[in-house]
């Protein structure tokens, strides 16, 4: 028998987060611990529009057999957050038993001490946007992700142009969150072609795969994010010619193991990979760091999201400094979450 413990949590967000399914102001999930000596920890933090619901997680987790938790993974298709929590806990336990950091257990070939992370600049006036970008650069970030798509296109293009003029030696990526139609996307990409943009993320709605296919491989690289929600691994393989970069969220893809499989296949196909959290608590954030380290991702990842939460379920082992996040080198994940004692 393998003991399985569960602890539900609800964490206030620092400011409301707009998701594919509306605004939320809290992140609710379930921390999981499996086994005895060593134990492994995982986290299921569902995100509306991307995964099953919190209730769906709770029900699925209560049905996991203590006689063989690993076998339960096969029954969790369609429940990516639940599968993520269980898969991460099992992998953490195995890595602790092997005495290696999780990313090495997941197949990481070399020691990775720090990973580049992006700063996110939200929607705002031109002045606010430029100020947020220059503040991030002063903190040492070398990649800025600027949210666009909430304003008329010309206003957004002005904001981007102002940031481009105000900064140098940084990678500037834009996230439109699917806001444009094809005509607007064409016009935007024409205007952005001489601004040396790293990529535009999700210019078109999530279901417009054909539209993205027509844009990918052009002068401005295209990244897909929302289009990956609710897709099986095979469904993601079919996106290979519809993007230049894929944004992979372990929580939405069903866990570290699945994210690694997809990431490695896409890297072999020549696509760029970016790993991001889904604004999770410390266990899942740290898990995403290990996935990025195992894939040896070079592009800045969306992992510096701890500050978006007002509180957390445990001590954070991954500090951000000079635009880089520390990869924990202790055996396993590097945090015990709510079971760690030194809770924040
Ligand atoms: Mg995005």
Image (cartoon, rainbow, N blue to C red):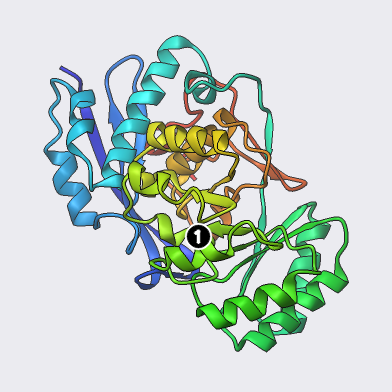
Q: Residue 171, percent across and down? A: 76, 56
Local packing at callout 1 (Cα closer than 10 Å; few below 14, some 14-19, many 20+) is few
Residue drawn at point x = 17 percent, y = 36 percent: 75
Residue drawn at point x = 75 percent, y = 69 percent: 193
Asked which secondary structure carries label 1, the reply is: loop
Q: Is residue 51 left or right of residue 195?
A: left
Q: Residue 268, percent across and down? A: 55, 33
Q: Is residue 19 left or right of residue 324?
A: left
Residue carrying label 1? 310
Q: Residue 194, percent across and down? A: 81, 69
Depth check: give the residue in front, 55 or 255.
255
Q: Is residue 44 left or right of residue 209?
A: left
Q: Is residue 49 visible?
A: yes
* Quarter of the image that includes the N terminus: top left
Depth check: give the residue in front, 306 or 296.
296
Position of 130 relative to 110 (above/below)? below
Depth check: give the residue in front, 247 or 237.
237
């Amino acid at each position: 028998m393998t003991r399985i413990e569960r602890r539900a949590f609800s964490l206030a967000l620092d400011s409301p987060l707009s998701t594919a399914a509306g605004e939320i102001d809290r992140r609710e999930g379930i921390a999981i611990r499996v086994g005895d000596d060593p134990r492994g920890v995982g986290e299921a933090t569902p995100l509306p529009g991307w995964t099953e619901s919190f209730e769906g997680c709770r029900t699925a987790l209560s049905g996991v057999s203590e006689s063989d938790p690993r076998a339960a993974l096969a029954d969790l298709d369609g429940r990516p957050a639940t599968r993520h929590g269980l898969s991460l806990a099992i992998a953490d336990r195995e890595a602790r038993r092997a005495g290696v950091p999780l990313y090495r257990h997941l197949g990481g070939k070399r020691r990775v001490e720090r990973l580049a992370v992006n700063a996110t600049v939200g929607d705002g006036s031109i002045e606010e946007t430029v100020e947020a970008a220059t503040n991030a650069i002063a903190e040492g970030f070398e990649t800025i992700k600027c949210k666009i798509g909430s304003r008329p296109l010309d206003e957004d293009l002005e904001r981007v142009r102002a940031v481009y003029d105000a900064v140098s030696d940084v990678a500037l990526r834009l996230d439109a969150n699917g806001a444009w139609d094809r005509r607007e996307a064409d016009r935007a990409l024409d205007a952005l072609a001489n601004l040396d943009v790293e990529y535009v993320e999700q210019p078109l709605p999530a279901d417009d795969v054909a539209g993205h296919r027509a844009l990918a491989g052009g002068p401005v690289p295209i990244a897909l994010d929302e289009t990956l929600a609710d897709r099986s691994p095979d469904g993601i393989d079919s996106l290979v010619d519809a993007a230049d970069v894929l944004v992979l969220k372990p929580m939405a893809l069903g866990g570290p193991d699945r994210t690694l499989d997809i990431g490695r296949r896409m890297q072999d196909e020549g696509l760029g990979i970016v790993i991001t959290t889904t604004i999770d608590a410390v266990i899942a954030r740290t898990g995403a760091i290990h996935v990025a380290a195992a894939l040896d991702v070079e592009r800045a990842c969306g992992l510096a999201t701890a500050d978006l939460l007002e509180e957390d379920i445990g001590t954070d082992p991954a500090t951000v400094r000079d635009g880089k996040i520390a990869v924990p080198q202790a055996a396993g994940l590097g945090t015990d979450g709510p079971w760690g004692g030194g809770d924040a």
